[in-house]
Image (spheres, rainbow, N blue to C red):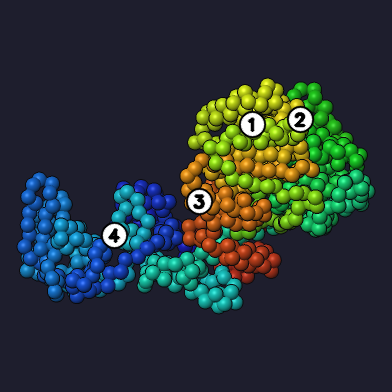
Amino acid sequence: MSRPAPLFPLFAELETLDGIGPKTTQHFAQLGIERPRDLLFCLPYAGVDRRAVASIRDIVPPTTVTVEVEVGAHVPPRRKGGPARVFVRDAATEFQLVFFHARADWLAKQLPTGQRRLISGKIEIFDGIAQMVHPDHILMPHEAKTLPAFEPVYPLTAGVTQKLMARAVASTLQRVPHLAEWIDPALKTREGWPDWHDAILAAHTPRGMDDLATEAPARRRLAYDELFAHQVTLALARTAFKRGKGRESHATGRLQSKVLAALPYRPTAAQERAFGEISDDMASDRRMSRLLQGDVGSGKTLVAFMALLVAVEAGGQGVMMAPTEILARQHLESLRPLAESAGVVLELLTGRDKGSERAAKLAALAQGRIQVLVGTHAVFQKDVIFHDLRLAVVDEQHRFGVTQRMELGAKGIAADVLVMTATPIPRSLALAQYGDMDVSVLDEKPAGRKPVRTALVSSGRYDEVVGHLRQAIAEGRQAYWVCPLVEESELVDLTASEERFRTLRATLGEGIVGLVHGQMPPSEKDAAMAAFVEGRTKVLVATTVIEVGVNVPNASIMVIERADIFGLAQLHQLRGRVGRGEAQSTCLMMYQPPLSDTAERRLQILRDTEDGFRIAEEDLAMRGAGDLIGTAQSGLPKFRIADLERQAGLMALAQSDARTLLATDPALTSPRGQAARVLLWLMSQDEAIRLISVG
């Protein structure tokens, strides 16, 4: 499938544009602009009013003014490198134009004494005198028409001026083709959106500040195009994944009923709803691709295990993957009692399994004697062969991209995939990242979980906090003490946590305090964790390695040092490590005064609510989409026009529109489908184009 001809001029070399040579091409690349098409999506972010006034007399400086003047005397610089001045007079008053490092002959040619010129630039008062330093525009009066009344202001970089940018954009706009419409006609009418061609022109020729707003019809339409192209790509990936014939795995309930009978509590309505959605997916002949999203402590593990039991009841195997060895072991621990109550064979496979032990596990797996495997990335290795893999559960999705989901699916003959995340993600981001999946949400806490008391304590009250700990230990309870990630440097980090470990050990006594941080060899880390889980140590000093998944019901105190420098979601995850047992739990957030406004707002939100979804929405509003998931490993697409924080509704609209289009026209062959193909090329959605070609 090749690029549609109408788009050729937009994908030509930049040098084919007016005023751009090999050198400027390199400057433009700094802005991510490599083809004329990129200029179309680099929209102005501000504008300057260039409407002419008769005189500067009544304006309030500093401000930008356009005025016709008569040129007076030229005054050369008094000293080398000083400014040259040109006196000018408008309809009512006189002022100066100031130029640094300008050649006298150039000035004389630009501003001949006695002639009239239209000048536009910023008027300022300096030593009581009105002056304009380096006017932006100097034109002959008859050229006034060439100056836009409202001039767009573009993002720039070294070597790219506003003039050069405006010229390159103008040259690109002459190439903009008229394309067939890919937006659903009813939606377009309802929203009052212009055609694509008109929208591009309008976005680059704003008539006032309103046209620069995110909500301006032309901009909304272009943002929608971007989101729609992204959602069509995800929908195609989803169809391709599901097209791979699934295996029907029918639950018999034989093992599930044993587990439910052994539980000391009843599953929540949200858990039952999620079981139902997953069982239905697994029973169908389409492959399941589902995201299980649940807040800290909403009982995802039970739901995932019930899903694994469906695979076993149907005669197959299941695998559960975790991003780290500590987490894989933790899963093993929490699943073991459930597996024992059902009589299911559960085994762990990590990078640490070597030699004959590993060989024995692999043989048992290939023969189907291991029914549920828990592991790390090690289960991806070539020599790991399943007898009949039907379900793969992937934990903490954000470390796993779409490609790994596909790889994992490839391990089994069309295995179903269930992804679990404990990070509540605002809806717009969930759609951007997981738009190819169906979503089940666990939005209630199991009965009997007490809320965690959250208190803010200034770092000056350190001794009080330690006294509180001593008291709790005497009552047989355990505590986490989390040290901050200082300056992202593992080394400083280390000293901070080791230092805190030493001071607490000195105060609370030998053998009571344990330490775990990112730099330890895995065996030491596991030993420290194990000592805490078994209650041999009472206080665990840790860096944020304990954030995900660790489960110690007896730990009822969480101290977070320098809570003011942590992100909201991170603090929420850390707090979720306590409140898992019978005792009333407390989370003490220690901060360094004075607090900045943002830090104060963050800590207030945490003190007021335990609802992870509300916290995530606030976090998105405060930090922006890229930071929220950590841009480096976010798997979030980069949008040039769309704004995920402000246009969450558009993303949801784009998703349902894309899915509807593909449901009625899976190969994109209808007139609207053909138009959507052109959009995919325009938006460089190579993955989608590949999927259509193979499809």
Give whichever of discs 1 and 3 has the lower sequence position.
1
Q: Which picture quadrant has residue 40?
A: bottom left
- On-image quarter of the N terminus: bottom right
Give whichever of discs 4 and 2 has the lower sequence position.
4
Q: Is residue 92 above or below residue 83?
A: below
Give whichever of discs 4 and 3 has the lower sequence position.
4
Relative placement, left or right, of 72 versus 264 is left
Circle 1 sits on which residue? 541
Q: CA distance from mark 4 to mark 1?
A: 58 Å
- On-image quarter of the C terminus: bottom right
Q: Which picture quadrant has residue 524?
A: top right
Label 1 is placed on what type of residue?
Val
Label 3 is placed on what type of residue?
Thr
Q: Is residue 620 above or below residue 264?
A: below
Q: Residue at x 12, y 49 (%)?
A: 82
Q: CA distance from mark 4 to mark 2?
A: 69 Å
Q: CA distance from mark 4 to mark 3?
A: 38 Å
Q: CA distance from mark 2 to mark 1?
A: 14 Å
Relative placement, left or right, of 298 versus 640 is right
Residue 483 visible in the shown view:
no
Label 4 is placed on what type of residue?
Lys
Circle 2 sits on which residue? 535
* Kind of element beneath mark 3: helix
Circle 3 sits on which residue? 598
* Kind of element beneath mark 4: helix
